[in-house]
Image: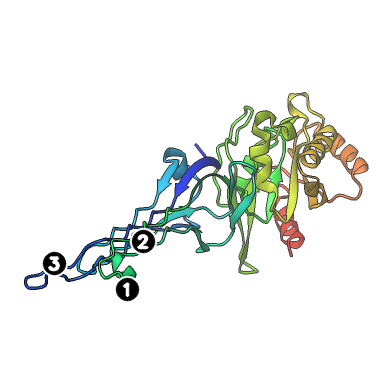
Amino acid sequence: MFYDEVKVFLKSGDGGDGSAAMHRAKYVPKGGPDGGDGGRGGDIVIRCDENVSDLRDFHFKPIWKAKNGEPGRGKQQHGKGAPNLVLRVPIGTVISRLEGAQVLAEFNEHSQERVFLKGGTGGMGNIHFKSPTNQAPRQTTPGEDGKEGDFLMELKSIADIGLVGFPNAGKSSFIGLITQARPKVGHYPFTTLHPSIGTIEYPDYYAKLKMADIPGLVEGAHQNRGLGHRFLKHIERCKMLLFMVDMEGSDGRDPLADVSQLRKELGLFNKALTEKQWAIAANKIDEPKAFANLRRLKSSRRKVPIYPISCLSEEGIPELKQALWDFCH
């Protein structure tokens, strides 16, 4: 199971209360105030970690609280401050308020770190309130409360290329061919159960590209049919989009209609997606009906780069791999 959206409650630690102690020692009947300060509450710190793949830790434990600072004690002993609570999130995590959906933080780089909720400061002990007219004060201040709130964590995959297409178009097979990803492959709706990111290596350039395999879309995805919103958000940050189309027309589909429908779904979800650079991978070109459909597709999309490929025979894969590099540079 892949967890890319969770609701969490976060609370930083409360500051410890100040102490109202009075000095007591033999032969010192009026020792005066000696209450120490309270310790600081722990901060909630969010750290971006490339070794974390999703938000599963927060799904199974939605409530996170940092420890409180210790209260002050007599003999001017200050309370110990609490340690910070560091929460690790994957690259591409966006945190917003649960109410109002205001984005508060985005984590897009490994080791990026932010104090998300500051812990409360410790209260002052009565030693701070001693004066010539008040030599035995009992006054203290309480520790400051920590910050808290309900938040939404969302994972939006960061990749150079977003691979989109309807179920069974061959996306999983394709990404398995040109990257190190090994998605589940089979013939049934939603073969890919969650977005996965593979790395395309280019030894000649000593470089790599990242490709996000987005689960198969369905008509009405922009209205959240078939978990459309959860899938579509993973391509918002891609540099370009590669449309994978089944040129055989399996399951009674029409490749030309598929392209139009995919463009429509993306635009209705976020118009900016239709303004991204895009190309078409015309898959299953080795099937009998493919060439006729390819001619129709090229005729209707004259300004769009179209790359005939076969994930079965690997025809056209090297050429498309090179084209993807050229697109992104």
Above or below, 223 against 212 in this view is: above
Q: Residue furthest top?
A: 252
Q: CA distance from mark 3 to mark 1?
A: 19 Å
User: Residue 319, percent across and down?
Assistant: 74, 55
Look at mark 2 in the image and give the residue it sits on: 123
User: Residue 242, percent across and down?
Assistant: 74, 48
Which mark's residue is nearer the viewer, 3 or 1? 1
Q: Is residue 4 left or right of residue 256?
A: left
Q: Secondary structure at mark 3?
A: loop
User: Residue 117, percent across and down?
Assistant: 49, 56
Residue ID at (46%, 54%): 88
Above or below, 30 against 260 in this view is: below
Quarter assignment of residue 324? bottom right
Look at mark 1 in the image and give the residue it sits on: 131
The amino acid beneath tag 3 is Arg
The amino acid beneath tag 2 is Gly
